[in-house]
C-alpha cells in the first residue's frame, strides 16, 4: 500500500506542505487494497452508507466527535463563529459560519474571488470534449455538466475541500441566477487524491449539482458542487435572483467535497501562481475570498 504523503503549496508562505488527511488509513484501504476494491460497490456506488453516516453526524450523539476534527491541523476552530461547546452535533460544527470579516476579499468587479476554502487547481484552454486534466480521466466537460457546452474554449477551477475546511461555499462575483441547480445523481467516491489516482473520473461519476450563472464581467459560467463519500447533503441557500459577490450560496454536510467553476476562456485570466503550481503538479491551499483571476 502506497504511503506517499499528499503535498500542497500553501499560497501564503509559498512552501510545500503535507496535507492532514482525516481517515487516511480507511481511504487507502478502500482504494489501494484488494479487499477494499471488492467492497467498493457497497461503499461508493449508492447513497446508503453516506446517508447513514449523515444521519449520525446530524444527531446529538455525534457532538463527541467534534473535538477530534477540531484538533486536526488546519481546522482552525478559533475562526468559528462560536466556541466548540455551542455546536449541538458534528454537522452543526462542520457547517459552521466563521467570525465576521475573517475572510476578506477584493470588492472590485474585475476580480474573481475564491468561493471556498480548499485546494485549487486551475486550467486554461479546455475544449468541451476535454476531461478535467486529472491523469487518466476520460469523461468530458460536457459529461460533467450534463449538456453540450459549445465550441468555445473553457477555463476551469477545481477546488477540493477536505474535512478540516470551512464547508460553506459562496458566489465568486456579482451574478444572476435564473433557475434552480440541476441535480445529477451519481456515485459517492471520495474526492481525495488517493481516490483520484484510482478513479480519475470521480467528478463526472459522483452526485453533483450544476448552477448556471450570469456575470456582467465574467459572462455565463457554471458552478458545480460535487458530493463525495460521507456527504450527507449539498444544501443550497439561494434560489433564482441577483447574488452579491461572496454571499453564501450553500454548504456541504460531512465529507470531503469539491466546487468546480467553468468559464469561457476569453473572459478571465487566472493568477500566475495558481497556473504555475498546477503545471508543476501541485494543488494550492487557498482561502475563501482570495483572488483567483481577473477580467481579460
Image (cartoon, rainbow, N blue to C red):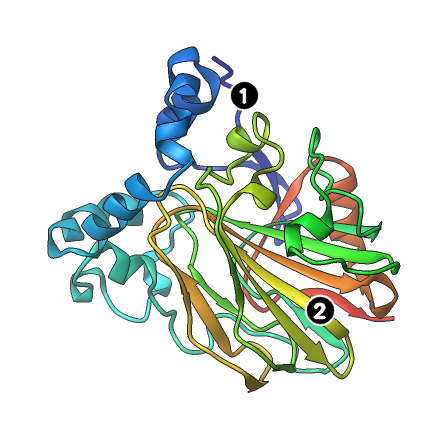
Q: Position of residue 40 (x, y in %)?
A: 41, 26
Quadrant hosting residue 17: top right
Q: Residue furthest left?
A: 61
Q: Position of residue 51 (x, y in %)?
A: 29, 48
In front here: 176 or 17?
Answer: 176
Quadrant hosting residue 20: top left
Residue 159 visible, this angle:
yes
Q: Earlier in the sequence, mark 2 or mark 1?
A: 1
In the image, residue 114 sits, relative to residue 203, either above or below, namely below
Label 2 crowding class (10 Å Cα cut-off): few <14, some 14-19, many 20+? many
Q: Looking at the image, which residue is at 32% across and 71% down?
A: 81
Q: Secondary structure at mark 1?
A: loop
Left or right of residue 252, residue 260 in this image: right
Q: Residue furthest bottom?
A: 242
In front here: 235 or 86?
Answer: 235
Q: Are marks 2 and 1 in contact (CB under 8 Å)?
A: no
Q: Position of residue 231 (x, y in %)?
A: 37, 49
In the image, residue 122 sits, relative to residue 78, either above or below, namely above
Q: Position of residue 204 (x, y in %)?
A: 60, 44
Q: Say which mark, if any, is on residue 4.
A: 1
In the image, residue 249 sits, relative to residue 277, either above or below, namely below
In front here: 75 or 244?
Answer: 244
Whole-number angstrom distance, CA of label 2 to CA of label 1: 36 Å
- Name the residue tied to disc 2: 221
Q: Secondary structure at mark 2?
A: strand
Residue 121 visible, this angle:
no
Amino acid at each position: 500500500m502506497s504511503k506517499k504523503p499528499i503535498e500542497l503549496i500553501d499560497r501564503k508562505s509559498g512552501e510545500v506542505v503535507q496535507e492532514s488527511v482525516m481517515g487516511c488509513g480507511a481511504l487507502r484501504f478502500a482504494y489501494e487494497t484488494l479487499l477494499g476494491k471488492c467492497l467498493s460497490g457497497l461503499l461508493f456506488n449508492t447513497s446508503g452508507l453516506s446517508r447513514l453516516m449523515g444521519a449520525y453526524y446530524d444527531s446529538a450523539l455525534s457532538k463527541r466527535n467534534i473535538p477530534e476534527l477540531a484538533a486536526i491541523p488546519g481546522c482552525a476552530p478559533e475562526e468559528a463563529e462560536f466556541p466548540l461547546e455551542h455546536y449541538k452535533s458534528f454537522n452543526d460544527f462542520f457547517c459552521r459560519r466563521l467570525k465576521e470579516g475573517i475572510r476578506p476579499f477584493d470588492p472590485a468587479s474585475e476580480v474573481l474571488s475564491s468561493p471556498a476554502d480548499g485546494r485549487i487547481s486551475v486550467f486554461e484552454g479546455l475544449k468541451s470534449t476535454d476531461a478535467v486534466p486529472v491523469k487518466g480521466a476520460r469523461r468530458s466537460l460536457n459529461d460533467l455538466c450534463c449538456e453540450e457546452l459549445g465550441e468555445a474554449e473553457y477555463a476551469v477551477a477545481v477546488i477540493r475541500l477536505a474535512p478540516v475546511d470551512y464547508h460553506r461555499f459562496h458566489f465568486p462575483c456579482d451574478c444572476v441566477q435564473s433557475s434552480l441547480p440541476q441535480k445529477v445523481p451519481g456515485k459517492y467516491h471520495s474526492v481525495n487524491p488517493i481516490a483520484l489516482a484510482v478513479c480519475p473520473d470521480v467528478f463526472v461519476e459522483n452526485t453533483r449539482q450544476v448552477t448556471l450563472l450570469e456575470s456582467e464581467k465574467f459572462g455565463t459560467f457554471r458552478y458545480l458542487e460535487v458530493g463525495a463519500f460521507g456527504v450527507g447533503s449539498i444544501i443550497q441557500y439561494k434560489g433564482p435572483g441577483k447574488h452579491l459577490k461572496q454571499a453564501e450560496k450553500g454548504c456541504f454536510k460531512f465529507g470531503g467535497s469539491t466546487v468546480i467553476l467553468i468559464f469561457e476562456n476569453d473572459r478571465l485570466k487566472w493568477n500566475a501562481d495558481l497556473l504555475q503550481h498546477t503545471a508543476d503538479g501541485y494543488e494550492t491551499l487557498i482561502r475563501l475570498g482570495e483572488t483567483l483571476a481577473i477580467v481579460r
